[in-house]
């Protein structure tokens, strides 16, 4: 889930809705997605797609986005 100011991603337990952690990304998040194996979180943050380690929230990679338009949806590729 994205936070109130739009720059925080919050991880929570889907069965209990307990907040597990929150990570600030230094820009407005327009969309988030999760890898099919649950190991990564993808966040569209203004000018980049940030790849986060789902366990730590560390940004492990970033891919520049070709447009300033907000990303509406982030989906993992099918295996």
Image: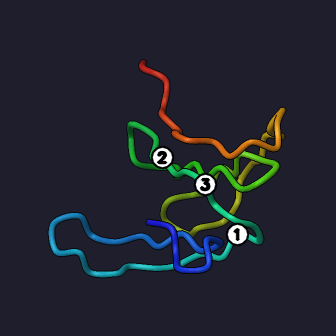
Measure the alpha-carbon separation of dots 3 and 2. 11 Å
Q: Residue at x 43, y 66 (%)?
A: 1
How packed mark 3 is, by other alpha carbons closer than 10 Å (few <14, some 14-19, many 20 or more), is some
Q: Which mark is residue 3?
A: none
* SS at mark 3 in the image: strand
User: Would you name the residue on which mark 2 appears?
Assistant: 33
Give the percent coordinates (x, y) of residue 73.
Answer: 51, 39
The relative height of residue 24 versus residue 36 in the rendered view (above or below) is below
How packed mark 2 is, by other alpha carbons closer than 10 Å (few <14, some 14-19, many 20 or more), is some
Answer with the quarter of the image where residue 19 lies.
Answer: bottom left
Quarter of the picture holding the C terminus: top left
* SS at mark 2 in the image: strand
The relative height of residue 16 versus residue 33 in the rendered view (above or below) is below
Q: Residue furthest top?
A: 79
Give the percent coordinates (x, y) of residue 55.
Answer: 49, 65
* SS at mark 1 in the image: loop
Measure the alpha-carbon separation of dots 3 and 1. 12 Å
Q: Are marks 2 and 1 in contact (CB under 8 Å)?
A: no
User: Would you name the residue on which mark 3 appears?
Assistant: 30
Measure the alpha-carbon separation of dots 2 and 1. 15 Å
Answer with the quarter of the image where residue 23 lies.
Answer: bottom right
The relative height of residue 79 versus residue 68 in the rendered view (above or below) is above
Q: Are marks 3 and 2 in contact (CB under 8 Å)?
A: no
In terms of depth relative to the viewer, which is nearer, 36 or 3? Answer: 3
Q: Residue at x 61, y 71 (%)?
A: 6
Q: Which mark is residue 25?
A: 1
Q: Residue at x 38, y 79 (%)?
A: 20
């Amino acid at each position: 889930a994205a936070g109130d100011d739009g720059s925080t991603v919050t991880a929570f337990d889907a069965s209990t809705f307990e907040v597990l952690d929150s990570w600030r990304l230094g820009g407005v998040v327009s969309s988030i997605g999760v890898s099919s194996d649950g190991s990564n979180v993808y966040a569209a943050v203004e000018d980049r797609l940030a790849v986060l380690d789902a366990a730590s929230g560390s940004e492990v990679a970033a891919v520049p986005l070709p447009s300033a338009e907000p990303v509406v949806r982030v989906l993992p590729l099918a295996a």
